[in-house]
Amino acid sequence: MHSYLGFLLRVSGHLEEFEAIFSVGLGKVAFSKHQPQVGDVVSGLGVESPPWEPADIYKVSEFKIGERGPDIESAAPPWVGSLPDLPTYRARGYRRLSPQTYAARCDSCKWACRMSVEIIMDRWDATVKRHRYETFCYGPRSCALYRAGRLRTVPWKGGPAWEEPEWLDDEATSHRGPDE
Ligand code: SF4
């Protein structure tokens, strides 16, 4: 969601005849049409993604919601329930989120995000790039489950690694109150 191109659904079910837990990329048009949320039973056709895509399956067609999950808005984190649209995420801003916390506590939270980030490796040549996955939280700054994790470093070709400053997260989210 970080690049605001779409949503990633975590699906527990069948990939052809194999049982699996996998992620499915859903674009914003399909998302607004179907409004999927935690607990829904879904089906569709898709293509196995190349390694740089955040989803296991993408180019989804014939997406259907067969059965709606329980209509829950959680009273404590991780926050489940109806998902906001992408402009709402963009307006909220994000903080970095520890990858371990993302995996252990935040996986089902509507404010959790894992995405492929592009890194320009050479300051003199913007075509030298690498991708890696990073995790983010768009949720309330008071969330008790939140752990920032280590500061991220960005390697430079032929120079010392650049460390992301701590104030970046504050700058991106300080327009919200602690419980928003
Ligand atoms: S830390 Fe962020 S992503 Fe994790 S449960 Fe709290 S609000 Fe959700």
Image (tube, rainbow, N blue to C red):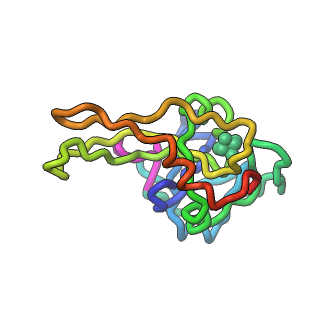
Q: Image check: 122 left or right of 2?
A: left
Of 95 and 127, the residue lying toward us: 95
How many discs appear? Answer: 0
- Residue under the image location 41 percent in, 45 percent down: 116
Q: Is residue 158 visible?
A: yes
Start-end of magenta stretch: 49-58
Q: Is residue 169 above or below residue 146?
A: below
- Residue under the image location 54 percent in, 63 percent down: 90
Q: Image check: 78 left or right of 138?
A: right
- Residue under the image location 42 percent in, 50 percent down: 47
Tell me residue 135's x, y (percent). 52, 41
Tell me residue 159's x, y (percent). 20, 33
- What's the magenta bit mostly, secondary-structure-wise? loop
Identify the image quadrant of residue 29.
Answer: bottom right
Q: Image check: 125 left or right of 25?
A: left
Q: Quadrant of the C terminus?
A: bottom right
Q: Is residue 108 visible?
A: no
Of 112 and 72, the residue lying toward us: 112
Q: Image check: 107 left or right of 113?
A: right
Magenta stretch holds residue 54: yes
Of 72 and 145, the residue lying toward us: 145
Q: Is residue 67 above or below residue 13?
A: below
